[in-house]
Image: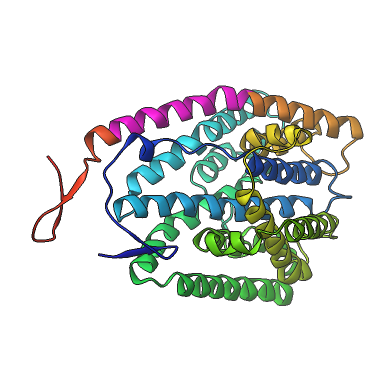
Amino acid sequence: MTVRVEGTVARPAQQTAHQTAVRPRLDSLDVLRGAAVGAVLLGHSWPAIFQGAGIVGVIVFFVLSGYLITGVLLRDVERHRKIRYGRFYAHRAFRLLPALIALLGVYAVVELTADVLGDRSKGVIGYTLIAGFGYLKDLPLPFDVSLAIGPLWTLAVEEQFYLIWPALLLLALRRNRQGALLGWSAAVVLSLMTASVLAMLILAPQLHSLVYALPTTWGLGLIVGSGLRLYRVHLFSWFSGRRLRRATLISSVLVLATLIFFPKANESAAFFFAGGPLAMAAAGVLVVLAASRAPVMPKWTRALQALGTVSYGAYLWNYIVILWLNGGSTADLPPLVAVSAILLTLLLAVISWNTVERLGRSARDRFDKYYDENWNAPARVEPSGALRHAP
């Protein structure tokens, strides 16, 4: 079997320490993560002003996620001529579940004991945990769930995408049809998004929040990011000139900065059809620029780098912290509450990164060692051409 990745032929490779080493984080991508979660914090804290900030930040995360996770899958194919699904999904679990378990655990304890949001009285705590742990928040559900897990719809969109994307990607690579995969995937997502938005506008405008969270509404961002990774060699060469890089950087930042003020972005057809794709394009440019630059970033970006490092925890905790501090509402936050929520969010994110997320990283490393020793024996090719595992 021949698998083509970025114009090269992927062949079975012997496992070496170099191949299994964890790839270092790029400071430039952490800066981008920090800017994205910063936009989300602004949107949650001052929703009347930064009406498009939350979804702009989420779109940047989607594009970045598609780029990075497709890169993980491609490295697997390049080295093993297959995707090791067990290892891939185990890594996803080690990365995401510890912080999610901590969030939902604290939520359940607080609501069961203090009933701050009234969820115990409403009887929705159990349903909320099902929706949160099941990555279902982006789908229409036959039961009510708490506002506390509102932002988890984005995690649900990602995880549902990665249930489908690895198999489709491998099939496309085997047939050298990556372009067709991207084109058909984008066409399907855009068609479903168009149908759902038009149905909302014609039949039930009040259901804008439901359509907003559907996996097809912003799934194009994940496809865009995946396409950037598949064709990154060509894209990196396009943005090699210093003047062009600077011009596209400034233009993309200005586009995203303008879109964070887009009025009623979560219910506007104009944003669904125009603002969203424009944000994806600008985010795509920033991802390419960030991934192709030197690893050392200017000192003035250190704060964004630090925020990007703990961005997952910050994203998880900010919304529920606002609800708890503001009597169950995210509207009309007093300035003191908004600032306090951001500071408390950052504190919880740092604690999460250094406790439960560190445990997840440690468990992932132990899993990798066990996996390589027991299930990932080097491959050898028999004279007949059959691929077999070495004893």
Tell me, yes or no, if residue 353 can be seen here. Answer: yes
Q: Position of residue 245 (x, y in %)?
A: 73, 57
Q: Position of residue 294 (x, y in %)?
A: 63, 44
- Residue at the spot x=69%, y=35% of the render? 305
As for residue 366 lying within the magenta part, the answer is yes
State the count of labels.
0
Image-quadrant location for residue 29: top right
Viewport quadrant of the N terminus: bottom left
As for residue 289 lying within the magenta part, the answer is no
User: Residue 48 versus residue 287: which sits nearer the camera?
Assistant: 287
User: Residue 40 versus residue 320: which sits nearer the camera?
Assistant: 40
Q: Residue furthest left?
A: 384
Q: How is the image coloured?
A: rainbow
- Residue at the spot x=60%, y=73% of the render? 190
Q: Position of residue 21 (x, y in %)?
A: 41, 35
Image-quadrant location for residue 275: bottom right
User: Residue 224 versus residue 12: which sits nearer the camera?
Assistant: 12
Reply above or below: 58 against 309: below
Left or right: where 21 falls relative to 369: right
Viewport quadrant of the C terminus: top left
Left or right: where 385 falls relative to 369: left
Residue stretch rendered in magenta on the structure: 351-371
Tell me, yes or no, if residue 136 can be seen here. Answer: no
- Residue at the spot x=79%, y=54% of the render? 253
Reply above or below: 279 against 45: below
Left or right: where 161 falls relative to 78: right
Q: Position of residue 283 (x, y in %)?
A: 69, 57
Image-quadrant location for residue 344: top right
